[in-house]
Amino acid sequence: MTRARQWRDGETPFGAWLRGHPGLESHTVSLAVTDADWIFHKYCIHRDSLGRRDVQLMMFLEVKCCGAEPSASQEDTLYMLHQCMHELGKQVRNLGNRQQVTLWHFGVFVLSLPGEGPDDHAACRWGAFGPSGRLQWRTGPVNVLAKLLAFDMRPDTFQPLDLRRHHASHVVYITEQTPLGFAVKRPILVRS
């Protein structure tokens, strides 16, 4: 049988079926299953001296209650997912028929609450994957948690989030010839 749930409520019919299905037993079919707790996706419009751009921020959050931590198997699975997501870093993406957006994916994090919810205690633990692939824990006040989840602070460093573009830019004018033969100067923004 797949590992029993650690928490007393919240079992979905699919989860019960999955845990009880003999064809999906973790030891006989070499299958590790973890549910996806929370995906945070913030969208904002950032304006700077270069203009306006859509910026979207994402992270995956695994939440553990009563001081729990992921099992070794779940930590390995979460780290593999973290590597896939974190390697994406900042990318420019198209969203359907919308204009391009800058997507910044921070990867996977683990929140360990001492009780059942954030308001039960003054502090909580935040786990971020280090270079070794193991969680590195920081203990912080619960009032910082909302800032991390709203991306007011970077979830990987706890520093204020800075959306400024860090490349120098300048305008260069090129001369193009129109179909009627006129020479027209057109500005182009160049980033170094």
Image: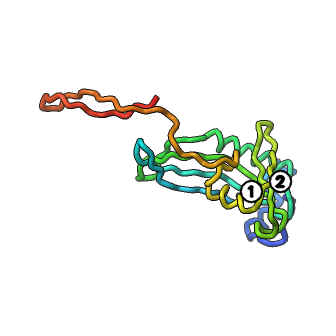
Q: Residue furthest bottom?
A: 9
* Mark identifier at residue 62: 1
Q: Earlier in the sequence, mark 2 or mark 1?
A: 1
- Return the residue nearer the eye: 6 or 150: 150
Write the residue at 67% across / 53% down.
60
* Spot occupied by residue 76 in the image (x, y as percentages of width and height): 80, 45
- Return the residue nearer the eye: 23 or 55: 55
Tell me if residue 111 can be seen. yes
* Spot occupied by residue 15 in the image (x, y as percentages of width and height): 76, 65
- Return the residue nearer the eye: 57 or 32: 57
* Mark identifier at residue 105: none
Tell me if residue 5 can be seen. no
Identify the amino acid type marked 2.
Pro
Colour approach in the figure: rainbow
Q: CA distance from mark 2 to mark 1?
A: 9 Å
Q: Are marks 2 and 1 in contact (CB under 8 Å)?
A: yes
Write the residue at 47% across / 48% down.
101
* Spot occupied by residue 54 in the image (x, y as percentages of width and height): 47, 50
Mark 2 packing: few (<14 Cα in 10 Å), some, or many (20+)?
Answer: some
Mark 1 packing: few (<14 Cα in 10 Å), some, or many (20+)?
Answer: some
Write the residue at 49% across / 45% down.
93
Quadrant showing the N terminus: bottom right
* Spot occupied by residue 5 in the image (x, y as percentages of width and height): 84, 64
Write the residue at 81% across / 49% down.
137
**Residue linked to disc 2:** 70
Q: Secondary structure at mark 1?
A: strand
The relative height of residue 183 versus residue 71 in the rendered view (above or below) is above
Identify the amino acid type marked 1.
Glu
What is the quadrant of residue 115 in the picture?
bottom right
Q: Secondary structure at mark 2?
A: loop
What is the quadrant of residue 18 in the picture?
bottom right
